[in-house]
Structures are given as structure tokens and as C-alpha cells.
Amino acid sequence: MRSEMTPMTRLLEAAQQGDQQAAAELLPRVYDELRMLAAARMAQEKPGQTLDATALVHEAYLKLVGDRNFNDRCHFFRVAAEAMRQILIDRARRRRSERHGGGRERVSLSDVASYAETPPDELLTLDEALTRFTEIDPQKAELVKLRYFVGLSEQDAAQALGISRATASRYWMFARAWLIQAMESGS
């Protein structure tokens, strides 16, 4: 198994053992990976929002850079998915809050053609349902986080979780059905 380690996994391992050169080389790669994931995630959103892929990746990068204890590339993806989820959920809560403008929509003058996010109420409802789903089936919930919050393809998410693509497909269908029902019923 050691012979199949990816360059990123080798860098993660070396950085954890205190290799400063590996840590210096790892950070730009991690940032580039996050940038690609954030761009893919934000491409799924509606037009008109102020949060863009660069802002999302900067916030996620800041959350992840302090936690260099990644076991491997797959672990990195799982932690990145959770970081991006937390950022998007926190932002939805702030946008919904009357203290921060309530229902008014902020428009960035520097980036008028940026992407829109899922409406805050819908994102918060999804987060509540996903939190309940995590208690029922943590692995399927991880798949949802990787697919929805990071924007990984079914194949990449399956690889990150160490499951087959067929299993990921079945998990995804079940998770989506469960979450849709939970969001519609509100229970």
C-alpha cells in the first residue's frame, strides 16, 4: 500500500513528521486543490451572490491550514468538505439574521457576475436534515458533504470514501431521497 501513496499523501506524511520543506511544498498544492473544489462547488450555485470561489477557498484554507494532521488525500477531502459546509452554513445564518440585513441581498460592485448561493433558509433546512442524517448513517452523510459542499463527482467521492462507484451511486440515491423527504416534512 505504501508504494501506491500519492505525492500529496507523501507530502502530508512528511509535513506531519516535521519536514519544513514538505510543509512549504504542501501548502500551495492544498490551496490549489481547494481552489478547484470551491470553483466546482460555486459553479453549481445561482448567479447574483457575493461569495465567490476565491472567498470560499480562502476561508476553507484558513480553517484547514491550522490542521495539518491529515492522514491522506481522502482525509483531506473529507475535512475540506466539512470546512466548506461550515462556511456556507455560517454564511446562510448570517444572511438570514436581521442584524445583517435580513432579506436584503448584498451586491458586490467588484464582481457583479459572481455566483448566487442557495437561499439561506433552504441551506439551513438542508443542514438540519443532514445533521439528523449523519446520526442515522454517517458514511452516506459524508458522501453528501463531498458531493454537495465540495462538488466532487460521484467517482471522486467514492474514491475519497474508499467505496465503489456503484455503492456511491446507491448511497447518493438513498441519501437524496431521505434528505428531500426530511426537508419537505420538516421533521
Image: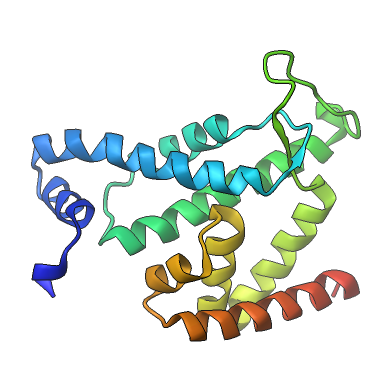
Q: Position of residue 179 (x, y in %)?
A: 74, 73
Q: Does residue 162 appear left or right of residue 10 in this picture?
A: right
Q: Does residue 129 appear left or right of residue 69 in this picture?
A: right
**Quarter the C terminus occupies:** bottom right
Q: Does residue 156 appear left or right of residue 120 in this picture?
A: left
User: Does the image show residue 59?
Assistant: yes
Query: Compared to 79, does 39 lie above or below?
Result: above
Q: How many tags in the picture?
A: 0
Q: Residue at x 59, y 48 (%)?
A: 41
Q: Residue at x 26, y 53 (%)?
A: 69
Query: Compared to 86, does 131 lie above or below?
Result: below
Q: Residue furthest top?
A: 109
Q: Nearer the viewer, residue 67 or 41?
A: 41
Q: Position of residue 183 (x, y in %)?
A: 82, 69
Q: Nearer the viewer, residue 106 or 134?
A: 106
**Quarter the N terminus occupies:** bottom left
Query: Compared to 82, does 58 lie above or below?
Result: above
Q: Residue at x 75, y 43 (%)?
A: 93
**In the picture, residue 98 is in which quadrant?**
top right
Q: Does residue 60 appear left or right of residue 95 in this picture?
A: left
Q: Residue at x 16, y 64 (%)?
A: 5
Q: Which color scheme is applied?
A: rainbow
User: Does the image show residue 66?
Assistant: no
